[in-house]
Image (cartoon, rainbow, N blue to C red):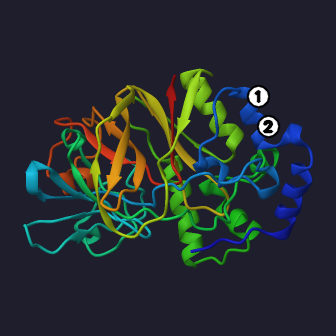
């Protein structure tokens, strides 16, 4: 599904880009001078703002598939490929169950997954248990190159001038030439609804409509001495088996995770929790390729909706075990250095 921004928006972006002092990239460097931009961010900069070529590939919008014990005692886990996916084998040779993401993101922990969402659809993210995050765990992964991104960041002055509220949906649709009743219109409504939804107790959240706002939220909650990390792989591959290599590293016990939303321009759902463990996970492919994924584990899920997707997939109860997920290609975690 693609959105098309009006030509006047593109013209405005090109005009602003000529002034480096106003560019989102300049703002990042002024606020976070020792923090390199992850590829998940540089992919969303307007071409005129990019200073360096892409150096790596991120993990595709994938999730994890919980399987059975593999040979040698390793846990078999499959990670969705292509557009991403989560599937769970209900028996050693059972049919995988794919979970369709409905109007709410799986990262909105207030939402309850319905049984009708448990059917074949790859556009999801799977949750898994922290106990599987160890050397020897086997995963079927599909690393894909980031697709062409039209929904780039807008400079903050422009983003702030565009309404972002359920009270102004008709104006928003008109500005971006989106037809009422279309799939694109429903995506816009869903994203705004999620951003306006209630917060989980113990968390802070904000939907940011510009890179500058993302930086402000991360620094206001964590300070300026932070790292920004996304999942990376060395080379695009089709499905193959990976194994978690030695060297799983715990990056921190609190952070700000920003999830990319579907919208005509770059919008991220960012939330901060002190009950979060972030990990760097080295992976070795069967063909010798290597990857480094970012996993985020939520250690306190007691305030999540009891019917959330994670609990249905993992067959666990809220607040009983840490629940984890890998960060898709276009998501970012900020952690204290």
The quarter in which the N terminus is drawn is: bottom right
Up the image or down, 152 lies above or below 222; here it is below
Task: Return the x and y of residue 242 as percentages of the image width and height.
Answer: 29, 56
Q: Residues within 10 Å of mark 2 (few under 14, many from 20)?
A: some
Up the image or down, 27 lies above or below 99; here it is above
For mark 1, give the secondary structure: helix
Q: Which residue is mark 1?
A: 30
At x 63%, y 56%, the residue is 167
**Label drawn at residue 5:** none
| 246 vs 216, nearest the viewer | 246
In the image: residue 47, left or right of residue 195 = right
**Label drawn at residue 26:** 2
For mark 2, give the secondary structure: helix
Task: Return the x and y of residue 12 as percentages of the image width and height.
Answer: 88, 57
Q: CA distance from mark 2 to mark 1?
A: 6 Å
Q: Are marks 2 and 1 in contact (CB under 8 Å)?
A: yes
In the image: residue 69, left or right of residue 288 = left
Say whether residue 308 is visible: no
| 314 vs 329, nearest the viewer | 329
Say whether residue 150 is visible: yes
- Residue that extends furthest to the front in the rendered view of this protein: 288
Task: Return the x and y of residue 210 as percentages of the image width and height.
Answer: 69, 46
At x 26%, y 64%, the residue is 114
In the image: residue 54, left or right of residue 103 = right
At x 20%, y 45%, the residue is 136
| 171 vs 190, nearest the viewer | 190
């Amino acid at each position: 599904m693609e959105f098309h921004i009006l030509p006047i928006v593109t013209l405005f972006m090109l005009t602003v880009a000529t002034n480096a002092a106003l560019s989102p990239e300049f703002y990042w460097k002024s606020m976070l001078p020792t923090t390199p931009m992850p590829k998940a961010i540089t992919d969303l900069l307007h071409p005129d703002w990019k200073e360096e070529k892409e150096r790596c590939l991120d993990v595709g919008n994938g999730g994890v598939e919980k399987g059975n014990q593999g040979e040698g005692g390793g846990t078999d886990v499959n990670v969705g490929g292509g557009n991403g996916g989560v599937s769970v084998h209900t028996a050693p040779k059972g049919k995988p169950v794919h979970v369709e993401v409905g109007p709410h993101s799986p990262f909105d922990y207030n939402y309850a997954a319905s049984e009708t969402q448990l059917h074949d659809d790859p556009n999801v993210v799977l949750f898994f248990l922290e106990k599987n995050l160890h050397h020897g765990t086997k995963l079927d992964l599909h690393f894909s190159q980031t697709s062409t991104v039209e929904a780039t960041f807008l400079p903050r002055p422009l983003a702030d001038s565009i309404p972002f509220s359920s009270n102004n949906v008709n104006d928003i649709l008109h500005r971006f030439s989106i037809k009422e009743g279309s799939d694109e219109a429903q995506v816009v409504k869903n994203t705004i609804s999620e951003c306006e939804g209630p917060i989980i107790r113990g968390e802070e959240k904000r939907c940011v409509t510009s890179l500058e706002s993302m930086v402000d939220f991360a620094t206001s909650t964590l300070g300026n001495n932070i790292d920004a990390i996304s999942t990376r792989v060395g080379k695009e591959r089709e499905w193959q088996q990976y194994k978690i290599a030695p060297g799983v590293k715990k990056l921190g016990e609190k952070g700000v995770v920003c999830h990319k939303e579907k919208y005509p321009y770059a919008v991220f759902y960012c939330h901060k929790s002190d009950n979060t463990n972030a990990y760097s996970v080295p992976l070795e492919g069967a063909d010798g390729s290597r990857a480094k994924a970012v996993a985020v584990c939520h250690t306190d899920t007691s305030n999540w909706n009891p019917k959330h997707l994670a609990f249905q997939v993992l067959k666990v109860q809220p607040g009983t075990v840490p629940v984890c997920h890998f960060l898709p290609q276009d998501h970012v975690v900020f952690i204290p250095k």
